Image: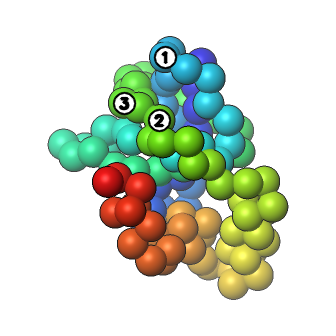
Amino acid sequence: MKAQVLLPKIFNFSFTYETTKEKLTPGDIVEVPFGKEKAIGVVWTDKSFVPKDIKIKNIHKKIGKISLNKNFINFMKWFAMYIKGCSESYFFSKIPKVWEVWMK
């Protein structure tokens, strides 16, 4: 199953990853490979678009039982549209140090 993952980076789009271990829903917090590093992201609601010549990497794991609810995801999308030029991932990256707490 493919999943779109929003990373707290300056991109205005989500990334496509593959998951085979467990069912993921939008809002789930996951660890994924990003370049040579690991990154923490959230499963997002975007539609996937994957060019055929791109290798899709696997999601490493779901982190904890914490999940962003649908209302918060909708708020992030609205806020990004309201600001115009601010992507959801940029807004997501500004959530203060939440990642460090979830990683412990």
Question: Which residue is depicted at the point 36% across and 30% down?
Answer: 60
User: In the picture shown, does residue 86 fall above or below 23?
Assistant: below
Residue 21 numbered tag: 1
Position of 76 relative to 21 (above/below): below
Task: Say which element carries label 2.
Answer: strand
Crowdedness near tag 3: few (<14), some (14–19) or many (≥20) residues, C-alpha within 10 Å: some
Measured Cα–Cα span from mark 1 to mark 3: 9 Å
Q: Secondary structure at mark 3?
A: loop
**Residue on which the image places disc 2:** 62
Separation of residues labelled 1 and 2 (CA atoms): 9 Å
Identified by mark 1, the residue type is: Lys
Quarter holding the C terminus? bottom left
Q: Residue furthest left?
A: 36
Q: Are marks 1 and 2 in contact (CB under 8 Å)?
A: yes
* Residue 51 percent across, percent down from the top left: 52, 28
Amino acid type assigned to the residue bearing label 3 in the image: His
- The structure residue drawn at horizontal position 34% and vertical position 52%, both measured from the top left corner, is 103
Give x and y (percent) for residue 24: 62, 30
The amino acid at mark 2 is Lys
Q: Which residue is mark 3?
A: 60
Seen in the picture, residue 78 relative to 33 is either above or below; the reply is below
Which percent across, then down, holds residue 68?
65, 54
For the residues labelled 2 and 3, the Cα–Cα distance comes to 7 Å
